[in-house]
Image (cartoon, grey):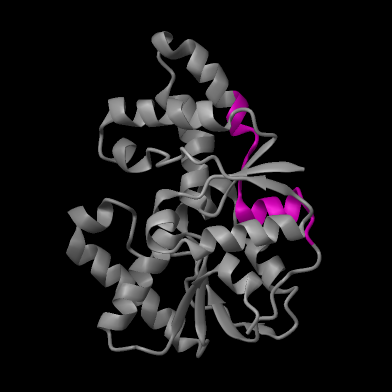
Amino acid sequence: MRVALFVTCLVDLMRPRIGFAAIELLEAAGCEVEVPASQTCCGQPAWNSGDHAAAAALAKKVIAEFEGSAYVVVPSGSCADHIRNEYPKILSSDADAEWHARAVALASRVYELTDFLVNVAHLETLPGKFAGSVTYHDSCAGLRSLGIKDQPRALLGKLPDVELKEMKAAEECCGFGGTFSVKFGDISAAIAARKCTNACATGAQVIVGGDLGCLLNIEGKLRRMGDQTTRVMHIAEVLVAKE
């Protein structure tokens, strides 16, 4: 299968090793991976901030760059959700009728990384050798809009030396929510503190998730709460780790 990787701007700017881990996983599943060099942002921050013009322009840019691919895989539930479910809405005006049809056509081929590995590529053998205890945080957009719940846990279950310790309220928000964390900082911080407390109560060595935005938020709060030892990793990093 030929797969195009939408890296996401956060991964590109903050933790590019997630992108390389995603490529390694896709290649382990037998995929030929291409990474369009001109890609930037999916436009989600603009859309959530009410900048419709910028969101539409970025949507058209992504569609033009990726619509020739058989599959588009995204290591982020929120970005995958935005491309898959929001683009047709953003480009729904009569003036954008052609773009709307192209957005719908692309949407059917867009997958979050773990969903693609489990349900499309049927990856059985993982390249990683990670050993240790982990707890998994379910990010809001992936869980509620794409049904990402069992897929990451199924992949973690393929690592024989990983112990999954489920946290209380794993499905609750971490407090990030993109611009929400900026507009409502105090509320965001309180939610993040509750998430960190629940995660640490499991005794797991690593907090794992599928959205880097959530992970950066959790790790930042964790460190401010004085925890300097609990690791915070994207699931792609765990699945390829050789430790």
Estimate the x, y position of residue 223 in percent, counting from the top left: 30, 82
Q: Is residue 137 left or right of residue 34?
A: left
Q: Is residue 188 above or below residue 7?
A: below
- In the picture, the quarter occupied by the N terminus is top right
Name the residue: 30% across, 75% down: 221
Query: In front: 189, or 84?
Result: 84
Name the residue: 78% across, 59% down: 123
Snapshot quadrant of residue 15: bottom left
- In the picture, the quarter occupied by the C terminus is bottom right
Q: Is residue 169 above or below residue 206?
A: above
Estimate the x, y position of residue 67 in percent, counting from the top left: 59, 28
Residue 173 seen in render: no
Which residue is outermost to the top?
Answer: 94
Estimate the x, y position of residue 120 in percent, counting from the top left: 75, 48
Q: Is residue 119 left or right of residue 240?
A: right
Estimate the x, y position of residue 42 in percent, counting from the top left: 42, 39
Name the residue: 66% across, 53% down: 115
Which residue is outermost to the front?
Answer: 37
Name the residue: 34% across, 55% down: 177
Query: In front: 7, or 140?
Result: 7
Task: Tally the numbered discs.
Answer: 0
Snapshot quadrant of residue 181: bottom left
Q: Is residue 3 left or right of residue 221?
A: right
Q: Which residues are magenta?
A: 105-123
Q: Is residue 119 left or right of residue 149?
A: right
